[in-house]
Image (cartoon, helix red, strand yellow):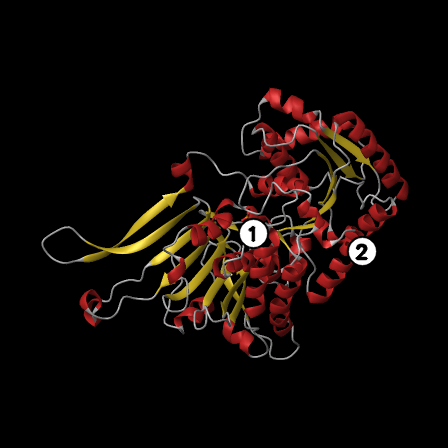
Amino acid sequence: MNRSAEQQMNPLREGLSTRAVPQPCSIVIFGATGDLTHRKLIPALYNLAADGELPPAVAIIGFARRPKSDDDFRKEMEEAVRKFSRQAVRDEIWKTFSQSLFYHQSEFGDEAGYKSLAERLEETDNERGTRGNRLFYFAAGPDQFETILKNLKAAELNRAKEGSWARVIIEKPFGTDLASARELNRIVNDAFDESQTYRIDHFLGKETAQNILVLRFANAIFEPLWNTRYIDHLQITAAETLGVETRAGYYETAGALRDMVQNHLLQLLCLVTMEAPTDLRADSIRDEKVKVVRALRRITGSEVAKNVVRAQYTEGAIGGQPVPGYRQEKGVDPKSTTETYAALRINIDNWRWADVPVYMRVGKRLPKSATEISVHFKKAPPVLFNKETVTIDQNVLVIRIQPDEGISLRMLAKIPGTSLRIEPVKMDFHYGTSFGKASPEAYERLLLDAMSGDATLFARRDEVEEAWTFIDPIEEAWHAKKDAPELYFYPAGSWGPEAADDLLARDGRPWRRL
Ligand code: BG6
């Protein structure tokens, strides 16, 4: 695939290989009064400023409906940053940072609002040296995307002047199935071409997710073992203690499979199973990832009940505190069949992974919040220390995405003493202790990358569409009028339904204990 004009404009930044070189720009946030802006975007931008990572010339313009002055917006954002920032807020840094925050009041569908935005951006370029570079962040609901895109196009804000750039960052959900994803992509690409489009999957911005490729391809010892000859199976778990919180409106139309598997978990799966890219450019990496999704065996019809388990939480307790069931949550249909848990048995039909099942599980209201990938190696041959009478454990490499980011390897060792007793021990690497500093938030890294023109950690159009072709048949089976697979239930605070344990037990394997 050719390097896009976009990437050629920024030769210093080549995928994961070098440091980001963010460029001066105006960042326009659509949906500036929403949750994402408060919780993630502005705190991330503040932290970048505090770490000296933001380019000196940056203007952040909140675009939303409610009337508000720049000062009101700054005050509101200060509260948000004080509440959600990773680092404690330093007054002198906030003072300088807040001077780059502005508010632009307009309805999303009001043409005049975009005209005045264009004028304001011109002024900003002159006053603040933002050089005509524009980053449009869509933090509004997906139902607003089309209106915003049409208006940006009409105001010619989708095209940058010679030597400058215009980019758009889109938040998930990228559709609810293949057809709607294609439609969304068509609408987006009608205003911005693919090289200008950054689809955020915040899991890719997590430090340990980025480290997967380093682990695999910067070390010579793993890759020779990373295949069906030596690996028995893989497990990917994303467990959350949180319930649906205030997001019932969205979640009721999504469910765990669309909310987490279609994007985050398949992205992790790609990173851990893809072939080595020819170089570290965004498209070289994304070319390899999309091949994995293409190789996933589609689970269709009656196979769905055998390979996928869906479940919903009922009332229970988290950390000793009673919590309601999903159907009792605010905004949820009392007869809802939306799944809050999904477990899948996946096959990758390629040479490297033939006969290596991947077990994936994701759920809300589980006993612990933890995301990890575990690579379970084949057992040692059944001789010497591994005779039938004393079967020993397998080696397991665990990549902890969160919390306590790190990597551990389980090995077997002799217990000191005169008799021969073998026990598993762990070689354990913790980011916090090894590097002595906290990892940046995913949004910090991703915003910086978008300002630098590096799309490596963003989902490409074909990846997203391909992922839906895997998800759609499962959703179809679940929503079939006849013989739809059962919806199981699990009490909040438990590790999901028994059916998910049976999924592995049938293959003679258990889920890893987290
Ligand atoms: C979001 C999902 O994309 O990821 C949420 O919509 C989920 O349902 C969240 O809670 C998990 O992200 P993190 O970074 O908190 O693990």
User: Which residue bears the numbered disc 2?
Assistant: 190
Q: Which of 196 and 409 is in front in this view?
A: 196
Residue 61 placement: quadrant: top right
The crowding category of the residue bearing disc 1, from other C-alpha atoms within 10 Å (few below 14, some 14 to 19, many at least 20), is many
Q: Residue 7: x and y, percent? A: 66, 47
Can residue 332 be spotted in the picture?
no
Left or right: residue 294 compared with residue 389: right
- Above or below 169: residue 275: below
Identify the mark nearer the N-term, 2 or 1. 2
Report whether the residue tagged 1 is closer than 8 Å to ligand 1. Answer: no
- Residue pictured at 28% horizontal, 55% vertical: 411
Amino acid identity at mark 1? Gly
- Crowding near pointer 2: few (<14 within 10 Å), some, many (20+)? some
Identify the image quadrant of the N terminus. Answer: bottom right
Numbered mark located on residue 243 in the image? 1
Q: Could you tell me residue 395's position as x and y percent?
A: 32, 59
Residue 24 image offset from top left, x and y in percent: 70, 33
Please state the total of marks drawn on the protein image: 2
